[in-house]
Amino acid sequence: EKGGYDHFMLKEIYEQPQVIRDTFRGRLLSDQGLIKMAGIEDNLNKFTNAKRIIIVACGTSWHAAQVAEYMIEEFARIPVEVEYASEFRYRNPIINADDVVIAISQSGETADTLAAIKLAKEKGAFVFGVCNVVGSSISRETHAGAYTHAGPEIGVASTKAFTTQITVLALIALRLAKAKGTMSQSDYLRNLIELELIPEKVQEALLENDRILEIAHIYKDAPNCLFLGRGFNFPVALEGALKLKEISYIHAEGYPAAEMKHGPIALIDENMPVIVIAPQQNHYDKVVSNIQEIKARSGKIIALVSKGDEQVKNLADHIIEMPNSTEALTSIIATIPLQLLSYHVAVLRGTNVDQPRNLAKSVTVE
Ligand code: M6R
């Protein structure tokens, strides 16, 4: 049932090209320049008239929500707030009838997310679900929704659910951009075409597995680890850190790269591995200077770079190459090496990768 893989997590990491394709199949019609999702089409006015969108989720799904915030605001220019469902439900939040609430959940059973949905419904908001498990409580409790097509995710550490969530959320953001006329036609089409290429680019990113295993051997005994990224890759850094802590039990933190100098840089010494997501995009030069600051304090740099990058290669202790895409969609690609890194570190440390201690696959109690 693990399909020849040692663990479900590894199988699920390798399934990503396929399940990302399954998730946009029939919805992304790039040759016609169209995105079709029934749950969005049927409620398009609710989204286009929304004063703001509030996204509620927990854990990895909350990280997907963070990516969605950047995508929806940039593409569709609708204000977005991302909330931990557990905080949202208990803080007497302001929710209006013209708010749209999006709830993201792999299992569709997370207690706090479910409670947040009920609260939003009581206040008259339209609630849209992004779930993986068909017929789950959250998919039933929401007014409409769009499923991810990741298939069953058995490993407690979420992998393919996350990248398919970003896929669905990218489709939504692009559909809303088209409806609102907030994106140039050429940018819109470029994102459609690039989204269609994501499965093969994820496949290419997986080819770095051997190099990542070597890096895992070097750092498997590190007590701490930092993950840095900017823009769309800031939530990817958070997700990389969560993955490492939950399955390898190494203390890890994700940060926006520029926040380093507001505190975490004090942690840097020759024993601190710092994983920096540094594709050749908008913030490239800024990330390069962040890398220089870490090097100046003897930190060990593991950099995720665009294929063929030379500048970071000369600065970093290790590089992991990945293909480029649009800035938003590179977040999907950059996730892959981080999943593999935490997987290999955990295996080398001998932890129970698929069922880490103290964790459950669905958190049905608050
Ligand atoms: O099923 P959900 O997406 O609602 O689950 C939310 C979190 O419990 C989940 O993402 C958790 O953080 C994972 N173990 C992360 O790998």
Image (tube, grey):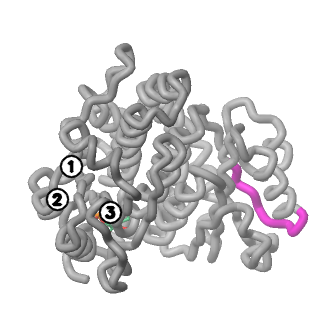
Identity of the residue drawn at 70% across and 54% down: 302
Q: Is residue 216 visible?
A: yes
Q: Amino acid at mark 2?
A: Thr
Q: Amino acid at mark 3?
A: Asp
Q: Is residue 109 left or right of residue 59?
A: left
Q: Mark 1 vs ligand 1: CB under 8 Å?
A: no
SS for tag 3? Answer: loop
Residue 275 on the magenta span: no
In the image, is residue 259 above or below residue 208?
A: below
The residue singled out by tag 2 in the image is 142
* Image quadrant occupied by the C terminus: bottom left
User: Callout 1: few (<14), some (14-19), or many (20+) C-alpha neighbours within 10 Å?
Assistant: many
Instruction: State the residue lying farthest toward the right.
Output: 296
Q: Nearer the viewer, residue 333 or 138?
A: 138
Instruction: State the residue lying farthest toward the top.
Output: 31
Q: Is residue 25 left or right of residue 58?
A: left
- Which range of residues does the magenta coloring cover? 296-303
Q: Position of residue 298 (x, y in %)?
A: 85, 66
Q: Earlier in the sequence, mark 3 or mark 2?
A: 2
Ligand 1 - quadrant of the structure image: bottom left
How many angstroms separate mark 3 from mark 2 (CA)? 30 Å
